Amino acid sequence: MARALELAKRGWGATNPNPMVGALIVDKNGDIVAEGYHAADGAAHAEVACLKNMPRPVEPTDTMYVTLEPCSTKGRTGACTDALISAGVKNVVIGATDFSPEHSGRGVEILKAAGVNVETGVLGRECEDLNFIFNHAAKTSKALLAIKYAASKDGKIALDDGNRAHITGKEAMHSVHEWRALFSSIGVGFNTVKIDNPALTVRRDGIPPSCRQRLIFSAELNFDFDMLSKRVFTDEFEDKTRVVCCADSPADKMDFLRRCGVRVMQLSAPSADRAAFWNELKERLFSEERISSIYVEGGAITLSSIINSRSADYAFVYQSPKVFGENALDALDERARGSWKIRNPKFELLGLDKLSYGEVEYL
Ligand SMILES: [Zn+2]
């Protein structure tokens, strides 16, 4: 199953809105005979890819290991339960249960009814955690909203002269790009674009740069031509950028942006109701565009708005050992600090920095 998990991760960032899944078949001696994984949305499911890679017919003593419960509905690619039964697979070991209401537990039942030996929950937690985005969307029919920020040891994001300081090292930056690759959209507030001029693209070693949907949050729409010269509005991925505003955002400014060729997404929530704003964004991105996740990188106003309206589902916090001092700018406003925590956080050491991440729990 650990090997099947490695195979699943080959689909990192390419399977949205589907889950990452890996599968393999071992013979009666425990030797791996074939492997497969779900490579991209629309491609063969892992079980089918694995069966295709079989060098010989399946024998009754072979066992398939798969990280996620095989699907039981005929989607674009056909039900995997049917494929396994007709290929003669007699033993299936499953990692995680599928959370989709139409699948959950049904795949196991169908296999058992067809006389297949089924074992579930092997490395279940790891297999479930891998698809935290897919699981969230399956349970809520909304995109998962994750916040990400890097802070000094004393919770600051900038030095007291207001200048942006390099908070974390290159290992942490590398990690950010890996996570950006997994998410289907990236968001920042207006001020972050104005001050930092970020590219918000995915840049990984040996892979050409790519870009997720870029969301720029602004209620006032205080755009001018200087703002529109920023990278997110002018680079090769400019068509992936849109400005997200509210019911009461000024109509003349929306017109100005549209005349300048900028995509504008106006939500029906008023700017005063931040909980409604974030909730509507999550619902609409998922139902209208199958965008299952939003990775919000700042700045402090946007992150605090998300936390204070109890809208964050997940968090990534990079912490540097540096101390900026009490006059430096805080990563989160006073109300947001201490109002939440990461439930059962996972930790990674990245050079001198530490990443904590996991589901957000409000206190
Ligand atoms: Zn399937």
Image: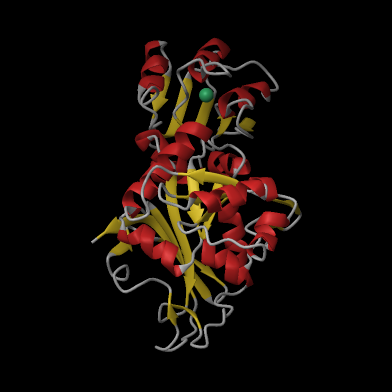
Where's residue 336, x and y in %? 32, 67
Q: Quadrant of residue 110?
A: top left
Where's residue 274, x and y in %? 34, 54
Judge whether 83 appears above or below 31 on screen. Answer: above
Q: Quadrant of residue 14?
A: top right
Quadrant containing the C terminus is bottom left
Q: Nearer the viewer, residue 299 or 2?
A: 299
Q: Residue at x 62, y 31 (%)?
A: 36
Q: Residue at x 58, y 47 (%)?
A: 255
Q: How is the image coloured?
A: secondary structure
Q: Nearer the viewer, residue 294 or 13?
A: 294
Can the viewer see residue 251? yes
Where's residue 79, x and y in %? 51, 17
Judge whether 217 appears above or below 101 on screen. Answer: below
Where's residue 144, x and y in %? 43, 46
Q: Nearer the viewer, residue 260 or 88?
A: 260
Horizontally, residue 190 falls left or right of residue 363, namely: right
- Residue positioned most to the left: 363
Can the viewer see residue 26? no
Q: Nearer the viewer, residue 328 or 343?
A: 328
Q: How many marks?
A: 0
